[in-house]
Image (cartoon, rainbow, N blue to C red):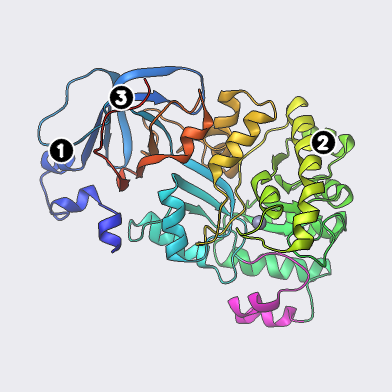
Amino acid sequence: MIARHLLHLSALTALAVAPAAAQTANNTLVLTHANVVDGVSATVVRDATILISNGRIQSIRAGGAVPADVAVIDLGGRWVAPGLIDAHTHISTLANARRALHSGVTTVRSASVPAYQDVEMREMARAGQIAAPDVLATGVFVTPNLGETLLADARLGTLAGGVNTPEQLRALVRVNLDHGVDWIKTRGTERAGLPDTDPRKQVYDERELRAIVEEAATKNVPVMAHAHGDEGAYAAVAAGVKSIEHGTYLSDSTLRLMKQKGTWLVPTLSTIWDLTQPGGDYDDPVLVLRGQHMAPRIEDTIRRAHAMGIRIAAGADTDYGAESVTRISHEVMRFRGLGLSAVDALATATSGAAELIGVGTKTGRIAVGYEADLIVLEGNPLDDAAWLQDVTVVITNGRVALNRLPFGRRPTR
Ligand SMILES: [Zn+2]
């Protein structure tokens, strides 16, 4: 099954002791007749030939000759954009990882999973063993009650009574760091997605959050903080977290502090809208009503944050389960509607998100030397972000993860 989904180009021929020249030739994929959007600028390269080898983009040329004996995908005038980056996911199964990848997401930042599945997924994806996006792992959520996630590591047993003091918080962060996480996820406030919690209510204060940030910094690991309410968010920003997740009720003073400290906003707006609708990841009448008053608030926050020049990254905040109806494309489309330019909106899910999560020099744009993480679309996503929903080819680290072509001719030019 996996092999069918993940055609590893270098595996087509003997990986062992092939002569260098032959290996290079057979490790190469060429995309022809591509219109290219780079994820950074408004520049479009038309009718380009993109040469990919050893997992990287080697050249992008208008027209251009195709070398002999290499795999070629003729895109017939379709559009190539960077593989999407989802800066807030909860993927913990192989099926869901594949669903994310097939939606065009080639890199994710995990926002916590129960038992370090994100760490293991990162390693297997990196080795090309499974069909999954590249993963920045977060491990166990740093939250007062670990519940079932206690079972992730026997050392967490000492925290069965709660994770509240700076010492307890540091202990949990250390276990996460020991598992090799790339990020720490904690919370400034309660959840929105449970009927009995109020998302405005603060959970950790600045001193407690600072303990988390300081402990994580011993391994140069940044911290992301779930926060809807303003007090909890302000405390998290003051404590030095790198990004605020959600940020529904942020005041101007909190936004000003974010601007001053370079804190990013990852609003996960689409999941707030998911609250308002039956089905999807949330299906509860209390949440339907809550979502209806949260959605205008978070949209107002996004408008003010963008006007103040705060960096925004896209996160779908889903596990990509079979019931999920939120995708990163929705986030980009909604940001367009809130006043971000086409280039800025696309960057929230490509080059900008890559910068936030720490992979901005490797992926998130279509450029020579970057990882060959890219998607093929039926139209120009800068004209209409909705094209991002209709992904026909997904390439991750130079490997073809999905290819629905060939069919018909391209619909737009
Ligand atoms: Zn989340």
Task: Give the residue displayed 21% in from the left and 49% down from the top.
Answer: 10
Q: CA distance from mark 1 to mark 2?
A: 51 Å
Would you name the residue on which mark 1 appears?
Answer: 25
Compared across the picture, whether 19 is left or right of 383 comes to left
- Assess whether residue 157 is covered by the magenta stretch: yes
Q: Which callout, 1 or 3, points at the residue further toward the start of the chain? A: 1
Amino acid type, callout 3 = Gly
Residue ID for mark 3: 77
Secondary structure under tag 2 reads: helix
Judging depth in this view, the residue of 390 and 173 nearest the camera is 390
Instruction: Kindly identify which numbered label has been placed on residue 255.
Output: 2
Residue at horizontal 13 percent and vertical 51 percent from the top: 13
Residue 300, percent across and down? 79, 35
- Residue 157 visible, this orientation: yes
CB under 8 Å between discs 1 and 2: no
365 to the left or right of 184: left
Residue 14 highlighted magenta (yes or no) = no
Q: Amino acid at mark 2?
A: Leu
Q: Residue at x 25, y 52 (%)?
A: 7
The residues colored magenta run 140-160
